[in-house]
Image: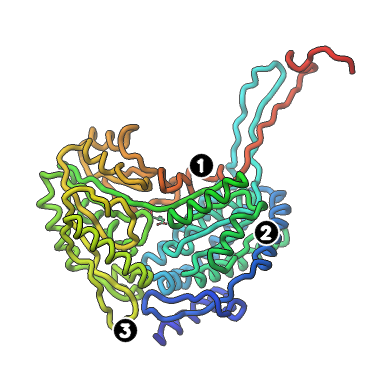
Amino acid sequence: METNQVTLAAQLSEMGVRLADYEGKDIVSTSPVSGQVLATLRADSADQVKAKIDRAHAAFLQWRNVPAPRRGELVRLFGEELRTHKEALGKLVTLEAGKILQEGLGEVQEMIDICDFAVGLSRQLYGLTIASERPGHRMMEVWHPLGVVGVISAFNFPVAVWAWNAALAFVCGNSVTWKPSEKTPLTAVAVHALFQKALARFGSDAPAGLAELIIGDREAGSQMVNDKRVPLVSATGSTRMGRQVAQDCAIRLAKTILELGGNNAMIVAPSADLEMAVRAITFSAVGTAGQRCTTLRRLFVHDSVYDTVVPRLKKVYAGLPIGNPLQKTTLIGPLIDRAAFDGMQTALAAARAEQGQVFGGERVIVAGCEDGYYVQPALVEMPAQTNVMQHETFAPILYIVRYTDLQQAIALNNGVPQGLSSSIFTTDVREAETFMSDSGSDCGIANVNIGPSGAEIGGAFGGEKETGGGRESGSDAWKAYMRRSTNTINYSHSLPLAQSISFDI
Ligand code: UN1
């Protein structure tokens, strides 16, 4: 569509992107809004990837000596650029990833939030002092920068995931190389340009090469993962990709932060506030067209409220505004591409074969966006937690199962390989506490009276089991981006007994 092209050119130039620097024949950015090609970019050759990692490594060697609060100043400036260009970047996210405009803007807001968090953190990289067992000795821990942090991000959070990693990595004294999804290279190019603006304002103590952007396919990502100058790889995406990254890094004993699949559940208990529950279910299941790793995919409803909740959901689903995500009234935009649509249909066919009753799920043709893959989100009433529910299908499918006993519902919540996010709706404090207890939900996120999606940056975002076990963003996630050194200082006049065995000097 002509208008998309005009919007795109305006967004890019506002953010200081010179598209000509990137254009080529290798990586095609297609808008899921309309199926139209936005741009075709050149992939980095193996030599270019190597040169970028060289530059990032050289930058690290300088940057680690810049005081941490000063490093925070760079992140503060970057946060300012994001505030100035929030609208343009948010719109670009909508164009390239298909999220509705509010979600595109929300993603940029998460970047701003993590910048604020990281600025404060730059003055709080605390280590412990430890009581020594020896007389006249002191022990302390100091956290040091790690090196080049390699970031791999997925299409569904094309800009925020990099920021969660990079903002922390920079204040921790590292440099960052970024390999974004092949499906969303333009948003990455834009973020890179905004970061360059912050660098230019910062001053000469920030080395060029602090942030390197690698445009390419899996090969380029794999080259970065296997480079021994990258001591930490933080990867978000499929379990298949994460397993490969984990194996490659394990061979050279490098660190990883992995954020992989989610297959998140909610339990609706007899005492739940059903009005709140229905809203939360809808938001978590259909937001971002079901393409978040925190999307609600499995719903366990107590027998006593099932016949109230499920008909309400069907009614709400029937009226969902599906359409062009650039329009303000739209709540559900497109799937990322045809393969996502096919994956959804395959899962629905499997659910039917396993005695599921499917409502919705069909393609919706949106006027002016005929080549986009829009769908009616699906509700699927299942007789039990069957095989299809073991898998994460990146589309808006919500499986619903009836339960009678809380322990049974918790077992169902935990009865899948993935362990990212989970939630319970209840006003019964015993049920809530049981769900959050040692024998409750086995996920990295366990919420009460709020859906499983929409995690704040202040928490350590991530999960357990096949989710990879990594943590990004808030809490003490920063420690993964640094190395710990324990110093023992002897201020006495002798060595501890064990070390003063007699020998001639
Ligand atoms: C993801 O889907 O990859 O909880 C991350 C949320 C977001 C993070 C999702 N803050 O919805």
Q: Secondary structure at mark 2?
A: helix
Q: Quadrant of ligand 1?
A: bottom left
Query: Residue 43 lies in what quarter of the image?
Result: bottom right
> Image point 55% across, 45% down: which residue?
478
Position of residue 315 measured from the top left corner of the image (x, y, whole percent): 14, 63
Position of residue 150 measured from the top left corner of the image (x, y, whole percent): 58, 56
From the viewer's perspective, tell me whether residue 74 is left or right of residue 113. right
State the residue position of label 2. Answer: 56
Question: Which amino acid type is marked by label 3?
Answer: Gly
Residue that protrudes farthest toward the right in the picture: 505
Residue 182 appears anywhere in the view: yes
State the residue position of label 3. Answer: 368
195 above or below 427?
below
Q: Secondary structure at mark 3?
A: loop
102 above or below 437?
below
Q: Nearer the viewer, residue 21 or 490?
A: 21
> Image point 47% across, 75% down: which residue?
29
Q: Between disc 2 and disc 1, whose residue precedes?
A: 2
